[in-house]
Amino acid sequence: MAKIRYEGYCEGEPTRLVREKFGNANVYGQQTKSLLTKATGFIAAYDFTLNPYRGCQYGCSYCYAAAFSPNDKMRQDWGNWVIFKENAEEVLSKELYKWYAKNPQTPPRIYMSSVTDPYQPFESRYGLTRRLLEVMLEVRDNGYPTPTLVIQTRSPIITRDIDYLQRFQRLRINMSIPTGSELVRKDFEPRSPSIKARFNAISIIQQKIDAFKGFVPKISITITPLLPTLLTDETSFIDKLAIADRIVIQDFHPSHNRSLIASTRPEANTVKPKYAWWYASEESSYIKFKEKLVSRLTHVEIKEGKEGFGYE
């Protein structure tokens, strides 16, 4: 099969043209043969991962997902392109019913998403993630149990879909908040939503989902990777984390130069020297922060790395 050549990121005649510009990002459409991918490694507790998009407009400096870009040019330009899967709804429906044909009473466990943010800015226009939630809910009309779903995001756009989210009996929302300091966020992930906006999104979900009218989701805050939080912000940040039932912490992925290897991008490593007070003794900083979490958040589950990403 010929390799796809994306306009702006290839030599010669492209086979995929830019559909539109959304902010700074080139947007491409592409057909897909499969949407549910067997979950392995870090999220092996699930049956499948589901990524509605390739690429992510947030373009966080540390994001390991850049390693899975279609080519080196797109890897270097992480954050400035996004590919949406044009036939995603049809494919997901077929794959779900194929699952239920073999497992009629066992809902699949789905992690959305592992290498993109399902609520990145383009979702506000295109609504692909919302339509996929609808597909997952429709199976109940045919007598099958709704999938167990975990949504990983850093976006307040998720509050748009509360009407669907409250219909999932088994749902966990993982909100990514790697630091409690806006100054640090702006250095490591300048395109992402503010910390305040993310906490507000969690509050809105908890306030608007009535336990008598729907299912209240489990809430995790994933501090992954754990970034520095300025001492002046630390106590306030930890107190705000009490809004969740689980906190997950994890350090940076090891750095690799090879493609298709989950690793921390060089862009993040160039920021680290600015926070030498933290990274000069990174292991100690990590341990001390974890100890503060455990000490102050006595009613919140504190987990590290892989064990924190399961549904239960």
Image (spheres, helix red, strand yellow):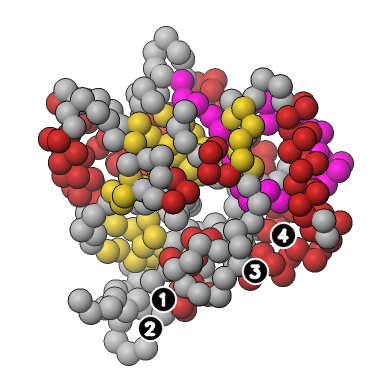
Question: What is the C-alpha distance between the residues marked 4 and 1?
Answer: 26 Å
Q: Amino acid at mark 2?
A: Cys
- Does residue 159 lie above or below 258 as drawn? above
Residue at 19% x, 45% y is 95
Residue type at numbered disc 3: Glu
- Lower position in the chain sequence, tag 1 or tag 3: 1
Query: Which three-letter amino acid code belongs to the residue tagged 4?
Result: Asp
Per the rendering, the mark at residue 275 is: none
For the point 65% across and 69% down, the residue is: 267
Q: Secondary structure at mark 2?
A: loop
User: Residue 10: which disc?
Assistant: 2
- N-terminal of the pair, mark 3 or mark 2, is 2
Provide the residue designation for mark 3. 267
In three-dimensional space, the C-alpha distance between marks 3 and 2, rounded to whole angstroms, equals 23 Å
Q: Position of residue 52 (x, y in %)?
A: 35, 51
Q: Nearer the viewer, mark 3 or mark 2?
A: 3
Q: Position of residue 264 (x, y in %)?
A: 60, 63
The residue wearing badge 4 is: 187
Whether the residues at callouts 1 and 2 have beta carbons within 8 Å, the answer is: yes
Q: Which residues are magenta?
A: 216-242
